[in-house]
Amino acid sequence: MAKRIERVQKSVKEILEDLLTGHREAAFSGPASALKYLNRTLEGQQSLPNGVKAVAFDLMAEAKAQLEDWEGVEAALQGFLANLPALEEALGHQFRATLESTTALERGVQARSEQGDFHGALELCEQAMALELGAHWQAKRDSLDWAR
């Protein structure tokens, strides 16, 4: 009887690094290629850890913004926000640096502004401030304060 091949168990950090490497390679051909890679990854790997999904949705929001698919940005933003707690749990002390490198909230503000949802854009600014993502979010919020 043949010996069964054991599945390789990668850590969340290793899976995340694989995702980032694959995305980087696909993005050389433009945002459409990056988006195709991310869609295939999310669809093809049902066991993808939720923390990694958060980063995939962040990258997806960026690609969709480059393609000016504002509804797609909103969908990716929702996926990012839904998986954000899992990202924090998976990365521990590396979470802060990873969170600060994401752009989903900025792309969400851009998409909502493009669609005329200034109140929604203001809410995202407040979420970013609650996450302590930097002083520039205060300025963004102040510029949208008229939407209250």
Image (cartoon, helix red, strand yellow):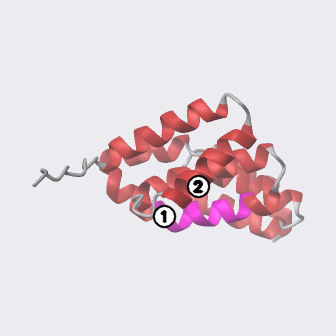
Relative height, residue 103 to residue 82 (above, below): above
Q: Residue 144 sits in which quadrant?
A: bottom right
Q: Mark 2–mark 1 contact, CB under 8 Å?
A: yes
Q: What's the residue at 65%, 60% (across, down)?
A: 76
Image quadrant in which the N terminus is located: bottom left
Give the magenta-colored segment's residue range.
73-84
Give whichever of 134, 23 is nearer the camera.
Answer: 23
Is residue 74 in the magenta section?
A: yes
Q: Residue 57 got which mark?
A: 2
Relative height, residue 94 to residue 7 (above, below): above
Q: Residue 14 sits in which quadrant?
A: top left
**Which callout, 2 or 1, points at the residue further toward the start of the chain?**
2
Residue 116 visible to the viewer: yes
Q: Is residue 89 left or right of residue 50?
A: left
Residue linked to disc 1? 83
Determine the main secondary structure of the stretch shown in magenta: helix
Give whichever of 113, 75 is nearer the camera.
Answer: 75
Q: Is residue 19 left or right of residue 70?
A: left
Is residue 93 in the magenta section?
A: no
Q: What's the residue at 34%, 44% (across, down)?
A: 13
Residue 143: x, y in percent? 81, 53
Mark pair 2, 1: CA separation? 9 Å
Q: What's the residue at 52%, 43% (across, down)?
A: 100
Q: Secondary structure at mark 1?
A: helix
The amino acid beneath tag 2 is: Phe
